[in-house]
């Protein structure tokens, strides 16, 4: 397919050109009427060709061409215009245009010619770019590869046995890894005396590859240089071999350290029912316990030493991203909920704790994963959640129906109140109104109460939640102040209703109130969020009762709800103000349920 960007300030030309070009099934055409818009699209999309008008008001075609060529020298650029002349054509070509085509009245022929030009340009550009990329790739690979590279010629004695090799060429990484320099044209026995005696197996492997032509990969304790190497060797031509190697000394040391840790925990590994995995930083299972073996349906020895893709080549490893995050951040992930599929196809839910393992230098050398089967617990929890959903649905329908009946009641009461002339009846009507409003508040309370604990608690910025809570309250003329900054609290998402109720009650029942202030302080038993005002306050005999439902001027609905919301995460609320001076509510957040911005990573 060829993806074309067509640029012209005339919408009619764009429409006609697109219709003609889409006759060809291998063309995809995007149209824009501005060179500026086209330039922004080039930053997002990988077009195969650009067709641009010359004369455009915001940016002419030549200026557009220069901008494109500044970052993409290969994309075919065709000037397709009805306003140009020979000078424009020369200028276009000099600035990197691939073709210049003047619009004509023979529309069918011109678009046929344009299609051929597009195909020719794209084909040539793809060939040029592929050749350049190939040359650049192989030119830079040898120089910049992190692995050591040695191109060698094998030498033999009179009996035809391998006796030495000569270094034909090496890269910079060879010298960095081995510490050997100026080796080109020299014999290995000259550079590393005694290599034959210390690593005779190396000669055997290299010669086997030279003779058979079959590549091999192996790990070797290269004692002459006191390093571990992972070597891949292949035969480029007769009598020669290429060795590509990397220093794996650090990994080997890490593996030894992990093996020590594993040996220390062997008794636990063998006997606990939880799934336990030790993995290195390359996603290999270094040690697993029998519980993992049962899940995989393979013996322990067949799992250890392999990575996930080697064990299950047809499955996607959805867990490795977690491992990488732990390795890079050097921090644990606790209580991760994951779904596992056993070799029998059964689905298990596990809760996993994933902990980085460190060497003596503080570097991560692996990950310990302990997974507990919570399938039965989750099944029960899901059943309860489903039942709660149905109950909430039922209560919602019931509230809706009662609400409708209340509206009908209020309507008829209104008619009666207008027509009534009897003061005694008027009093009865007012009492019915009051009772009906009580029912209305109770319905609202049940709606809010059923939402408590439905969603998991989250970390919330206290100042931001308070600010959001008062948006729907007309606070004037009361002065309002929030002196809390950089504090987060772990609470139910409905915590916003707590602050709303405190402010709303203060405004409604404070009588002489002129200010409301929120502030906080850290104490021995936790962090306290304080809401105080200068209203009439609350009498001592009511301080505990106000948190009961439907008590004291009907504020109990909101305060009882507030107490239940806070209690989800162990937060308490008390009233400590002085009657006649003002109300003061103290919300105590226990240790571990609050944090400051400086503690947040």
Image (cartoon, helix red, strand yellow):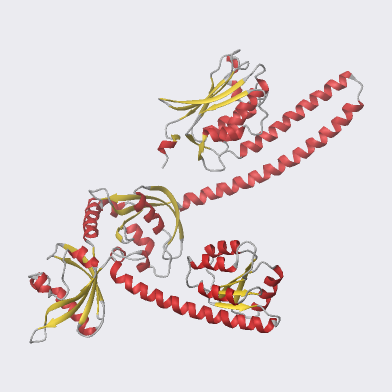
**Where residue 415 sits: x, y (%)?**
88, 31
**Where residue 275 sits: x, y (%)?**
36, 55
Q: In which quarter of the image is the C terminus?
A: top left
Decide which of 111, 490 is in the foreground and name it: 111
Tell me what residue is drawn at x 69 percent, y 32 percent: 442
Q: Is residue 273 visible?
A: no
Residue 234, placed above or below residue 42: below
Residue 204, placed above or below residue 260: below
Tell me what residue is drawn at x 49 percent, y 50 percent: 378
In the picture as drawn, the residue positioned furthest to the bottom comes out as: 159
Q: In this view, does 46 lie to the left or right of 514?
A: left
Q: Is residue 423 left or right of residue 26?
A: right
Decide which of 412, 179 is in the foreground and name it: 179
Decide which of 81, 426 is in the foreground and name it: 81
Q: In this view, does 341 lie to the left or right of 204?
A: right
**Where residue 501 sits: x, y (%)?**
62, 29
Q: Can residue 379 be seen in this view?
A: yes
Residue 581, placed above or below residue 458: above
The quarter holding residue 507 reads top right
In the picture as drawn, the residue positioned furthest to the front comes out as: 87
Decide which of 218, 398 is in the foreground and name it: 218
Residue 291, placed above or below residue 113: above
**Where residue 56 sits: x, y (%)?**
64, 66
């Amino acid at each position: 397919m060829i993806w074309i960007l067509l640029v012209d300030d005339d919408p009619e030309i764009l429409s006609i050109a697109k219709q003609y070009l889409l006759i060809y099934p291998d063309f995809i055409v995007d149209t824009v009427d501005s060179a500026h818009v086209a330039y922004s699209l080039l930053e997002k999309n990988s077009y195969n060709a650009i067709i641009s008008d010359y004369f455009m008001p915001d940016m002419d075609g030549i200026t557009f061409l220069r901008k494109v060529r500044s970052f993409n020298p290969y994309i075919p650029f065709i000037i397709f215009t009805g306003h140009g002349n020979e000078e424009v054509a020369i200028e276009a070509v000099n600035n990197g245009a691939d073709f210049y085509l003047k619009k004509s009245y023979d529309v069918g022929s011109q678009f046929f010619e344009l299609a051929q030009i597009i195909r020719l340009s794209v084909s040539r550009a793809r060939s040029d770019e592929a050749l350049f990329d190939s040359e650049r790739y192989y030119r830079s690979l040898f120089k910049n590869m992190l692995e050591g590279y040695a191109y060698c010629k094998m030498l033999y004695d009179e009996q035809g046995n391998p006796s030495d090799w000569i270094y034909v060429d090496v890269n910079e990484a060879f010298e960095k890894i081995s510490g050997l320099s100026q080796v080109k044209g020299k014999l290995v026995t000259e550079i590393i005396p005694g290599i034959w005696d210390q690593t005779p197996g190396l000669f055997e492997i290299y010669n086997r590859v030279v003779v058979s032509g079959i590549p091999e990969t192996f790990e070797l304790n290269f004692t002459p240089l006191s390093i571990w190497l992972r070597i891949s060797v292949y035969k480029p031509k007769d009598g020669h071999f290429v060795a590509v190697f990397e220093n794996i000394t650090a990994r080997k040391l890490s593996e030894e350290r992990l093996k020590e840790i594993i040996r220390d925990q062997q008794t636990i590994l063998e006997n606990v029912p939880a799934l336990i995995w030790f993995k290195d930083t390359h996603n290999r299972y270094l040690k697993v316990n029998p519980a993992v073996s049962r899940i995989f349906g393979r013996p322990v020895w067949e799992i250890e030493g392999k990575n996930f893709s080697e064990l299950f080549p047809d499955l996607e490893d959805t867990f490795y991203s977690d491992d990488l995050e732990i390795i890079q951040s050097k921090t644990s992930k606790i209580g991760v909920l994951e779904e596992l599929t056993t070799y029998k196809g059964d689905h298990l839910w596990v809760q996993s704790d994933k902990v980085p393992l460190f060497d003596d230098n503080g570097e991560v050398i692996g990950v310990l994963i302990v997974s507990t089967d919570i399938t039965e617990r989750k099944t029960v929890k899901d059943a309860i959640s489903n039942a709660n959903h149905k109950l909430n649905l039922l209560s919602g329908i019931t509230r809706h129906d009662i609400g409708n009946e209340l509206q009908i009641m209020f309507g008829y009461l209104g008619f009666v109140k207008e027509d009534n002339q009897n003061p005694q009846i008027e009093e009865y009507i007012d009492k019915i109104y009051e009772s009906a409003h009580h029912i209305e508040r109770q319905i609202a309370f049940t709606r809010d109460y059923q939402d408590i604990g439905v969603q998991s608690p989250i970390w919330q910025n206290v100042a931001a939640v308070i600010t959001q809570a008062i948006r729907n309250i007309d606070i004037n003329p009361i002065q309002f102040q929030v002196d809390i900054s950089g504090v987060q609290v772990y609470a139910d998402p409905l915590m916003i209703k707590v602050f709303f109720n405190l402010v709303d009650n203060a405004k409604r029942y404070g009588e002489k109130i002129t200010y409301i202030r929120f502030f906080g302080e850290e104490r021995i038993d936790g962090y306290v969020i304080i809401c105080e005002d200068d209203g009439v306050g609350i009498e001592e005999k009511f301080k505990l009762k106000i948190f009961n439902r439907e008590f004291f001027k009907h504020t109990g609905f909101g305060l009882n709800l507030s107490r239940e919301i806070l209690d989800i995460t162990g937060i308490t609320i008390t009233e400590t103000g002085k009657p006649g001076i003002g109300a003061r509510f103290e919300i105590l957040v226990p240790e571990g349920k609050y944090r400051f911005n400086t503690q947040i990573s």
